[in-house]
């Protein structure tokens, strides 16, 4: 079990084994993201919590708030993840893949209704 009042560092030792637990159609870049490992390996495979069964799961973008909620026993545990690198986002887009659920928190927020222009078109 988990020890109370302790921080633990999780490291993926075997990417090939973890990759087998993720949907086959995702790119290797997608599968190597911390958020993908948490989502597919820990939540879905180990804890049996699939998409659509997220009652009791909260996503907090502020580390300090997440720690405080665990300390105050509002949360049972928290996973603190590294931000996704811009080059990983580009690699996933280049592979025509999608980013994992709740992995694209950008700040500052883009204005609603922003118009995008394709730069490579004449």
Image (cartoon, rainbow, N blue to C red):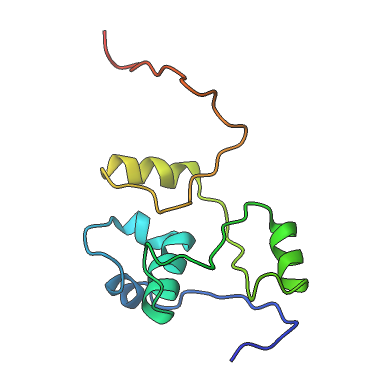
Q: Nearer the viewer, residue 79 or 57?
A: 57
In this rendering, is residue 14 above or below 84?
below
Q: Position of residue 61 (x, y in %)?
A: 62, 52
Q: Residue furthest top?
A: 122
Q: Quadrant of residue 53?
A: bottom left
Quadrant where the C terminus sits is top left
Q: Residue at x 36, y 77 (%)?
A: 45
Q: Residue at x 42, y 47 (%)?
A: 88
Q: Quadrant of residue 106?
A: top right
Q: How many marks?
A: 0
Q: Position of residue 71 (x, y in %)?
A: 77, 72
Q: Residue at x 47, y 19 (%)?
A: 114
Q: Nearer the viewer, residue 96 or 39?
A: 39
Residue 70 as seen in the image, left or right of residue 102? right
Q: Position of residue 113 (x, y in %)?
A: 46, 20
Q: Residue furthest bottom?
A: 1
Quadrant where the N terminus sits is bottom right
Q: Nearer the viewer, residue 54 or 110?
A: 54
Q: Quadrant of residue 52?
A: bottom left
In this rendering, is residue 21 above or below 23?
below
Q: Position of residue 74 (x, y in %)?
A: 70, 70
Q: Residue furthest left?
A: 25
In this rendering, is residue 59 above or below 92?
below
């Amino acid at each position: 079990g988990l020890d109370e009042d302790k921080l633990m560092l999780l490291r993926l030792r075997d990417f090939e084994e973890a990759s087998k637990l993720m949907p086959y159609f995702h790119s290797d870049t997608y599968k190597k993201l911390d958020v993908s490992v948490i989502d597919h390996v820990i939540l879905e495979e180990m804890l049996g919590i699939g998409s659509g069964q997220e009652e009791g799961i909260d996503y907090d973008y502020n580390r300090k708030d997440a720690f405080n909620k665990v300390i105050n026993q509002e949360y049972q545990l928290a996973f603190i993840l590294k931000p996704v690198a811009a080059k990983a986002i580009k690699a996933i887009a280049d592979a025509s893949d999608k980013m994992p659920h709740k992995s694209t928190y950008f700040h500052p927020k883009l204005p609603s209704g922003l118009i995008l222009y394709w730069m490579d078109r004449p």
